[in-house]
Structure formats: C-alpha cells, structure tokens
Amino acid sequence: MASLKELPPELLSYLLSYLPGTELPKVCKVCRKLRDAVAVDLVWQTRCNVEYRFVSKQGWEPASFYDIYTKVLHKYGSVVGLWQPHIGPYGGLTYVKYERGQIVGYDCQPPREPDVKGPLRLKPLFSITLNGESGEVEQKCHKGYGGPHKCNILLKANPLEGLSLEMKCLELHLHQHPGGRETALEEWILEETDGGHHGPMFHERELLIIKFHILMQLQHHANVMTPIKLPCLGPAVKLVDPGLYKGNYGSHGIELILLTYQGQFQEVHGMKITGDPNVPASEISITADLRRPMILTEDQQDSVEVLGEIDTPDILPGNETNFVREQPFKIPQDCIDRYRRTPKTCRARFHGFGRIAGHGYTNPSSIPGHWIVFDEHNFGFIWLDLRSFSMFSKVTETFDIQPSAAAITRGQI
C-alpha cells in the first residue's frame, strides 16, 4: 500500500482540505511535501467555505484564501449572523454579514411610526477589512460624524454565559457633533420622526430625549451583544410564521419582537428584541394561549368592556383547526388604533396576556388581551386594560444566520 507522501500533490491537497483549518499547521511540520500540499490555496478556499460559509474573495484581492482564513475568518468569521445589543433597556438588532472585501455589522432599526410594514432602517455600525498593502486586519467604527475610525471587536465564549460580541470605539471624540449636543439631539429627533413629517407629541418627544441621553452615556462603554437564534418554520405551524416582527408600542414607537411557539404549539410568546424604559428588551411582551380560541361576531366587538367579559373553555386536543377560519374583526369604539389600516376580517383569535410596567420596569404585571391572527405574516394584540390595539408585521428582510461549522465545533453555538 502506498504511503500518504507517495500520493500525487493534487490528490494530497484534496485530502488535506478535509482537515479543520486549525489542524493544518500541525500537518505542515511533518515534512516539506505535506507543507507544500497545505500551501495550495484550494485547501484554504475549502476551509473558508466549509467552516465560515465564505465562498468568494471578490473585493479581498490580492489576499489569498490562506490570508483571509488565518487573519480574518479564524478570529472574526463567527461574528456573521444576528445579534442583540444590550444597550440599557432599548436593546437592538445587529446584522453582521460578508460584503465585498469586508465584514460589515449593520444596526437594524425599526421603521418609523406608524408604518409597521415598512423596511428596517439599516445603518453601518462597524467593519472588518484586510488592508491589501500592509496585510493587517483593520476594525472600524462607523458611528459618529468623522467617518470610519478605529474600534476594537472581540468575540468571547464563556462556558456559563455563552457567546458574546463586544465592540468598543477607540475615538469617541469623533462621535461628538460639530454643532454641539443640542444640535445632535434635534437632528436625531428629526431622523427618528421622518424629518418632522411625523412630529412627536410632547410626551413622545420627552421619551426620545431620554433615549438620546441614555445612548450618549452608554457609548463610553463596550457595546456587548449576544446571538439571536431565529426559530425554524415547522410543518405544524398553521397560524403565523415564527420569527422577527415589528409592532406599534404607543408613545415608544415601533419595536421589534421575536415570536416563538412554546410546548406542543400550545402557546405563543413575543419577546422584545428592542425595548423601552417601561418594558425593556429581552422581556416577554405578549403571550397567547392557543388552547383558548374565540370566534366573535361583529356586535361582540363594540367595546372593550364586552370583550373583557368573553371567556371560552379550553379546546380538546385535535380540534385546533376548527377555530382557524375567517371571522369578522373590528377595533372597539373605545380602543385606540394607532395603525388605522386594520383588516376587517381575521383568521383566528385567542385569549392572551400583555406585559406592562412602570418606568424602570417597576411593578411589572400581565394584563389580559386578545391575540388576533390576520395571516401568516401579520397579527394584532388588544391590550384590554389599556384599551389599545397594536399591529405587528413580519420582518421581511432575509438574513444569512446559519451557524458556521467553526462556531459549532468550538462549542460557541
């Protein structure tokens, strides 16, 4: 039987490409022939693809796949995906992806009130590039007013807390508006209210001012993020697709929640991805009991008081589909509808609960509500005690969020 070193170089390189990239340096120490076989760029192209789903180096030239793997992907490849920043009570959504010649992290902000069906507002947050001249990795912060500048990006794997991503700007003076803090505040409010076309009421402006000042204070600290795992679409899902949704939250504007099914599809939970000073990010905002459906007439929906008196027994297993059929829907006369383009029919309706709290998440409690399914991508929630209706619409943007093989083998995911 021929030894490994007697194989043709092309076949030897092909076989070595199946080894993890972290093991290939050990192979190079065996002999010159194996070292030469490992040096073939096709070996590293395979590892970039298999371990980090990196398939094209367009824009990264003149770097080789070896350079990209050893200098960029080995350290930063696992940051590609969805992350939730822990920014006070506000949270957030960050999407990191490969772009031409760089890894870019985007701050994904909800659309402006009241357009829950609008696209997310994506703003560059940071970038990771490989300098073609020096061969060094450059990390840049894209916030502020002075253009991209230096930052530190660090990926941590803690056995107890799991994976986390930290970003810290190293040139905070570039985050200061040339016109001063008050000018920065006014421009930020205009941006958050669509240039003043949807100008805030007095109490809404006060909430925006509070948010601005908290964000300014927190920028002096490292921006810590944890990964977001989106649920898969299962064959048993018949009501609403699980995943990210945008919803109206009154004076707090539009926020993002993650909708998941619990147990044997007996409950629905909506966890906040973005939050506010009352109910912060990462808390459960709404729940629905799929064992307590309702079919209501239009007259039964005249007032919140009538809705609050409606009760239904739990349904028997196997009879769930009997309650998934079109029925009339209307907003009660004494209920606030901020969406104002609500459908006149729905396909299902269930008892549920919504989380409320005082400022600073004080005295949190759950109040009764109704979860209303309009179609696979849209649902509503009536907060009975608040006499308020919120509309939720699925985030339509697609994300490349499959965990890399490297992250899995290292126990990071």
Image (spheres, rainbow, N blue to C red):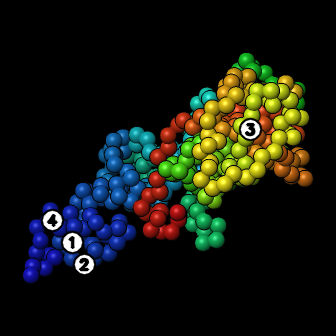
Q: Point out which mark residue 270 bears.
A: none
Secondary structure under the numbered disc 1 in the rendered image? helix
Pointers 1 and 2 in contact (CB under 8 A)? yes
Residue 272 horizontal/vertical position (percent):
70, 47
Spatial CA span between label 1 and label 2:
7 Å
The earlier-in-sequence mark between 1 and 4 is: 4
Secondary structure under the numbered disc 4 in the rendered image? helix
| Disc 1 versus disc 4: nearer the observer | 4
Residue that carries the numbered disc 3 in the rendered image: 381
Secondary structure under the numbered disc 3 in the rendered image? strand
Q: Residues within 10 Å of mark 3 (few under 14, many from 20)?
A: many
Give the quadrant of residue 409: bottom left
Spatial CA span between label 2 and label 4:
17 Å
Pointers 2 and 3 in contact (CB under 8 A)? no
Q: Is residue 215 left or right of residue 49?
A: right
Spatial CA span between label 1 and label 3:
63 Å
Pointers 1 and 4 in contact (CB under 8 A)? no
Q: Amino acid at mark 4?
A: Leu
Q: Is residue 261 left or right of residue 46?
A: right
Residue 103 horizontal/vertical position (percent):
47, 46
The earlier-in-sequence mark between 2 and 4 is: 4
Residue that carries the numbered disc 2 in the rendered image: 30
Secondary structure under the numbered disc 2 in the rendered image? loop
Q: Residue at x 42, y 61 (%)?
A: 405
Q: Residue at x 53, y 65 (%)?
A: 412
Decide if residue 370 is in sight here. yes
Residue 255 horizontal/vertical position (percent):
71, 39
Residue that carries the numbered disc 4 in the rendered image: 11
Q: Amino acid at mark 3?
A: Phe
Q: Amino acid at mark 2?
A: Val
